[in-house]
């Protein structure tokens, strides 16, 4: 998959495409947020991106696996991700549903196989989308530029939940672009990656670099066509 600028039928494009005629699915992600100890924002973003990679590569999502048809249906339509929050008993109920829990430094994110837009399990449907406004207690350290970096736009003000979904989009684009050998190496290493906000000058260069670019469809928070993430994986750099 090339960048969003060059795909006429992009799953993230804001204009109408053939994907809109397909049944629409969503990939649910739930972030564990306890009032007393919420995770740091960057930790949550990176954990959400890794969660998307884990479900894409899970054997249950491939071939004749139990999630494979749902994953195919989801990827044939718009690629939608929705992040909701849970704590206490809500989190325990969500964690009992089929899915994958991925942990970061302190963050926990559970990703579930795709569901129809109007077919959320009741345990997830009642969870709140709002309330995922997380902060970094200290500015994130400089990213490891020898590894994958998901660069966020410096021009957009996104909630943590929205940014988590966008980081997941960027990770997914990188995954799709990579040759099989590079996918395996990334998987075997545990999907190391960084999520950082780009400097304005560097952002302009990144968006025309040929790396995968996410352009949001504009369903929530930001304008359609907004460039949100550039997926900078070492194996994709020119």
Image: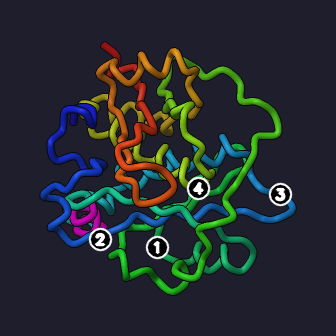
- Looking at the image, do the residues carrying marks 1 and 3 touch, with CB atoms under 8 Å apart? no
Left or right: residue 134 compared with residue 128: right
For the point 67% across and 59% down, the residue is 132
Label 2, on which residue? 66
Q: Are marks 1 and 2 in contact (CB under 8 Å)?
A: yes
Query: Which numbered mark, 3 or 4, is in the foreground of this view?
Result: 4
Q: Is residue 69 a member of the stretch shown in magenta?
A: yes
Q: Which residue is located at x 34 percent, y 18 percent?
A: 209
The residue pinned by badge 3 equals 37
Marks 1/3: CA–CA distance: 25 Å
The residue that label 4 is drawn on is: 161
225 is higher (above) or lower (below) than 61 = above
The residue lying toward the viewer, choosing from 181 and 34, is 34
Query: What are the residue bounds of the magenta stretch?
Result: 66-74
Q: Earlier in the sequence, mark 1 or mark 3?
A: 3
Distance from the alpha carbon under mark 2 to that under mark 3: 35 Å
What's the CA distance linking mark 1 and mark 2? 10 Å
In contact (CB < 8 Å): disc 3 and disc 4: no
Residue 186 relative to residue 72: left or right: right
Prevailing secondary structure of the magenta residues? helix
Mark sitting earlier along the chain (4/1):
1
């Amino acid at each position: 998959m090339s960048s969003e600028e060059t795909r006429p039928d992009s799953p993230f494009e804001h204009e109408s495409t053939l994907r809109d005629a397909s049944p629409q699915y969503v990939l649910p992600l739930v972030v564990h947020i306890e009032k007393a100890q919420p995770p740091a924002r960057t930790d949550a973003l990176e954990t959400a991106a890794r969660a998307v990679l884990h479900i894409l590569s899970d054997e249950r999502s491939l071939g004749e696996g139990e999630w494979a048809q749902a994953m195919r249906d989801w990827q044939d339509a718009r690629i939608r991700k929705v992040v909701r929050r849970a704590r206490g008993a809500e989190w325990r109920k969500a964690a009992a549903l089929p899915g994958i829990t991925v942990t970061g430094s302190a963050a926990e994110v559970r990703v579930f196989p795709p569901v129809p837009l109007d077919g959320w399990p009741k345990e997830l449907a009642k969870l709140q989308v709002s309330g995922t406004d997380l902060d970094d207690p200290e500015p994130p350290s400089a990213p490891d530029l020898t590894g994958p970096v998901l660069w966020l736009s410096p021009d957009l003000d996104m909630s943590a939940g929205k940014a988590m979904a966008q980081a997941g989009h960027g990770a997914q684009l990188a995954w799709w672009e990579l040759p099989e050998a590079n996918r395996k190496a990334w998987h075997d290493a545990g999907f190391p990656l960084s999520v950082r906000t780009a400097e304005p000058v560097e952002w302009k260069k990144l968006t025309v670099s040929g790396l995968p670019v996410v352009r949001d469809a504009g369903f929530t928070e930001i304008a359609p066509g907004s460039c949100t993430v550039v997926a900078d994986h070492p194996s994709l750099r020119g």
